[in-house]
Amino acid sequence: MTGIPVGISTCLLGKEVRHDGGHKHSRFCTQVLSRHFDFRSICPELEAGLGVPRPAIHLREYRDGLRLIETRGTADHTDAMHGFIDEVMPSLADLRGYILMAKSPSCGMERIKVHNENGNVTRRDGRGLFAEALMQHYPLMPVEEEGRLNDDTLRENFIERVFAYDDWMQNVAGDRLTGRALIEFHTRHKFQLLAHSEKIYRQLGPMLGDLKSEPLADIADRYITLFMEAMTQRVRRGSHVNAMQHLMGYLRDSMADEDRKVLMEQVQAYHRGEVPLVVPMTLLRMAQRREPVDYLHSQKYLTPYPDELGLRNRV
Ligand code: SF4
C-alpha cells in the first residue's frame, strides 16, 4: 500500500541537518505515522545552500519585511531562502499535510521570536519563512507542528484532516471534479462535519443544492474552503454526542432495545468523560455491521482513519 504523501521537516526524521549537526527525531512520526504517511522531507536551510554545520540564524524585522540573519553578525540568507521557496513550492501541490519543526526561523509555524535590527527580541508571534510561504501557498493543506502532536486532541484533529483532505484530492479535486463526486464526498463526510461545526454543516448542504447556478469549480472551491475550516474546529464532547445520536436515528429499526440501551449508556458515559470516544463508536459500528444501512456504511465519521492509530482511545 502506498502511504498518503505528507511533507515533514527533515530533522524530525532523525537526519542530522540542524545548524549544530544534530536532529530532532520524532519517534511518533518515524514509527507510527510512517506506516500510513509517505513522508517527503525538506530541510529548507540545508536545501537553500546554508550547509551543515552552519551559523545559527534568526528572524529580524526591517522596513521591507522579515529577513533571515545570522544571530552573530549581519550575514543575510533571506534571498537564498526565498529562491529555494520559489523553486520548491510548486512541487508540493500533491501533499495532503505537513508536519513542521517548532521554534525554527524557517520551519516554525507559530510563536517564533522576531528581533529588531540590533538583534533584540521585539515580538514572539512570528512564523518561519518556509512555513509562512507553505501556508500562504496551500491554505487548505493541514499543517501542524510536531510538538503539538503530543496533545491528544490536536493530534487526532490533524490526522483526521489529513485523511479527509486526501479523500478530496483523490476523488474530487482537479480533473476528477463532477457534481456526483462532490455530492458523494459531502455525503461521506456529513457526520464528521456535523460534529466539527453544525453551523458550517448547515451552510454546505444548500451550497450543493443547485450545481448549475455557477461554474462547478467555483462551487467546489467555496465548498472545500469551508469544509476544511470546519474540520479545523475542535470537536467538543457534546458535539460528538449530537452526531452519534443522529447516527442512532438511522439504526432505530435494526437495534434491539437492550443494545440501544447499552449504547445510550456509553454515549452518556462518554459525555461525562468517563470513557473515551472509541467505546460508544465501537458499539455504533457493531450495530451498523450487524444490520448494514447503506447510507451509514459510507460515513467516514465511523472510521475517519485506521483504527491502529488508536486515536479515539485518547479523546
Ligand atoms: S527546523 Fe527546518 S530548517 Fe531547521 S533543521 Fe529542521 S528541517 Fe532544517
Image (spheres, grey):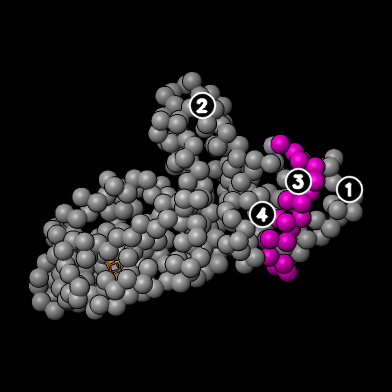
Q: CA distance from mark 2 to mark 1?
A: 38 Å
31 falls in the magenta region: no
In what quadrant does ligand 1 lie?
Answer: bottom left
Q: Going from the N terminus, do you reach mark 3 or mark 4 first?
A: 4
Q: Residue at x 47, y 40 (%)?
A: 170
Q: Which residue is mark 2?
A: 179
Q: CA distance from mark 3 to mark 4?
A: 17 Å
Q: Residues within 10 Å of mark 2 (few under 14, many from 20)?
A: some
Extent of the magenta region: 273-294
* Residue at the outermost front position: 1
Q: Which residue is mark 1?
A: 256
Q: Which residue is mark 3?
A: 288
Please state the horizontal and vertical placement of residue 4, each as a whole percent of the image. 45, 51
| Circle 2: element type | helix
Which tag is nearer the camera, tag 4 or tag 1? 1
Mark 1: amino acid: Ala
In the displayed structure image, the side of residue 304 where residue 134 appears, left or right? left
Residue 9, by quadrant, is: bottom left
